[in-house]
Image (cartoon, rainbow, N blue to C red):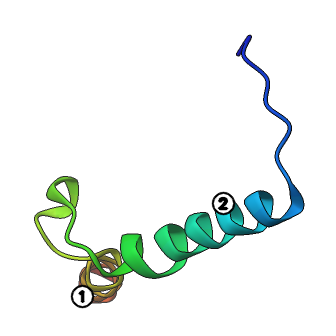
């Protein structure tokens, strides 16, 4: 990255808040095509259930 910008403290906080919202809330709730159009939490539950049934 060659274009460097110095961000103010408020801009940094805003960017961090947006990042947290996307990572913590949105991505955990949205459906992912790579997971069969289910959210990551449901995918993990399904995977754990399959592992339990296979054992």
Front residue of 14 and 53: 14
In the image, what residue occupies the spot 26% across and 74% down?
30
Mark 2, secondary structure of its residue:
helix
Q: Nearer the viewer, mark 2 or mark 1?
A: 2
Mark 1, secondary structure of its residue:
helix
Front residue of 16 and 52: 16
Report which quarter residue 6 is drawn in. top right
In the image, what residue occupies the spot 77% across and 68% down?
13
Residues marked 2 and 1 touching at CB (< 8 Å): no
Q: Is residue 18 left or right of residue 33?
A: right
Q: Quadrant of the N terminus?
A: top right
Q: Residue 5's x, y, as percent?
A: 79, 31
**Image position of 31 with respect to 4: above or below:** below
Q: Is residue 7 left or right of residue 34?
A: right
Report which quarter residue 16 is drawn in. bottom right
Front residue of 17 and 26: 17
Q: CA distance from mark 2 to mark 1?
A: 43 Å
Q: Residue 7's x, y, as percent?
A: 82, 46
Q: Which mark is residue 53?
A: 1
Q: Quadrant of the C terminus?
A: bottom left
Report which quarter residue 35 is drawn in. bottom left
Q: Is residue 6 left or right of residue 35?
A: right
- Callout 2 environment at 10 Å: few (<14), some (14 to 19), or many (20+)? few
In the image, what residue occupies the spot 79% across and 23% down?
4
């Amino acid at each position: 990255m060659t274009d460097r910008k110095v961000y103010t403290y408020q801009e940094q906080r805003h960017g961090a808040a947006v990042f947290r919202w996307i990572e913590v809330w949105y991505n955990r709730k949205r459906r992912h095509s790579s997971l069969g159009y289910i959210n990551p939490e449901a995918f993990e539950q399904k995977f754990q259930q399959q592992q339990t049934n296979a054992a």
